[in-house]
Image: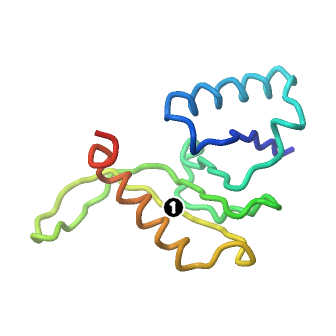
């Protein structure tokens, strides 16, 4: 059975707090001590398929959530830079499923664009 723990009010937490709460929820799942309250109220899910060596997967929305992002495995790939040089870079595939009754495709595409920019240049955002 699919179990999706919910980290509530994530916008008010830093990365360390989110990580610690996630670990606590995973431990509760493994110990079969998770409550229904800790499994409800989510709006957005992140699904890491990369740990299963999956490149891309189209995730199914967990209703009533607004969107789910699937992140594939990271592989080294040849990339042509703006100056036409070729570099080897770690690359991954993202797949976003959304409920169009809640969210339009344009803001979702802008979210992916911003997310990719942060992943490519994290120090520009968290320094």
Q: Residue at x 15, y 70 (%)?
A: 82
Residue 124, horizontal then vertical, whole percent: 27, 48
Mark 1 Cα-neighbour bin, 10 Å: few <14, some 14–19, many ≥20: some
Q: Is residue 6 left or right of residue 32?
A: left
Residue 14, horizontal then vertical, whole percent: 50, 34
Q: Is residue 7 left or right of residue 15?
A: right
Q: Residue at x 25, y 61 (%)?
A: 78
Closer-to-camera residue (118/70) = 118
Location of residue 68 (image quadrant): bottom right
Considering every residue shown, the one lying at the far front of the view is 12
State which quarter of the image contains the C terminus: top left
Location of residue 123 (image quadrant): top left
Location of residue 1 (image quadrant): top right
Residue 75, horizontal then vertical, whole percent: 39, 51
Q: Is residue 26 left or right of residue 75?
A: right
Above or below 93: residue 45:
above
Closer-to-camera residue (63/10) = 10
Above or below 40: residue 100:
below
Name the residue tied to disc 1: 94
Task: Count every numbered label the image shows and give the total.
Answer: 1
Q: Residue at x 65, y 28 (%)?
A: 21
Above or below 2: residue 26:
above
Closer-to-camera residue (121/101) = 101
Residue 38, horizontal then vertical, whole percent: 81, 36
- Label 1 sits on a secondary structure element that is strand
Q: Is residue 91 left or right of residue 10?
A: left
* Colour scheme in use: rainbow
Q: Residue at x 82, y 61 (%)?
A: 63
């Amino acid at each position: 059975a699919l179990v999706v723990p919910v980290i509530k009010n994530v916008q008010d937490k830093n990365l360390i707090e989110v990580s610690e709460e996630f670990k606590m929820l995973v431990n509760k799942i493994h110990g079969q001590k998770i409550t229904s309250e800790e499994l409800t109220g989510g709006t957005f899910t992140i699904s890491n398929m990369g740990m299963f060596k999956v490149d891309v997967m189209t995730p199914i929305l967990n209703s009533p959530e607004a969107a789910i992002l699937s992140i594939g495995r990271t592989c080294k790939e040849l990339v042509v830079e703006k100056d036409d040089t070729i570099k080897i870079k770690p690359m991954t595939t993202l797949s976003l499923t959304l409920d169009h009754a809640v969210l339009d495709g344009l803001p979702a595409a802008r979210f992916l664009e911003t997310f990719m920019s942060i992943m490519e240049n994290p120090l520009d955002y968290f320094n």
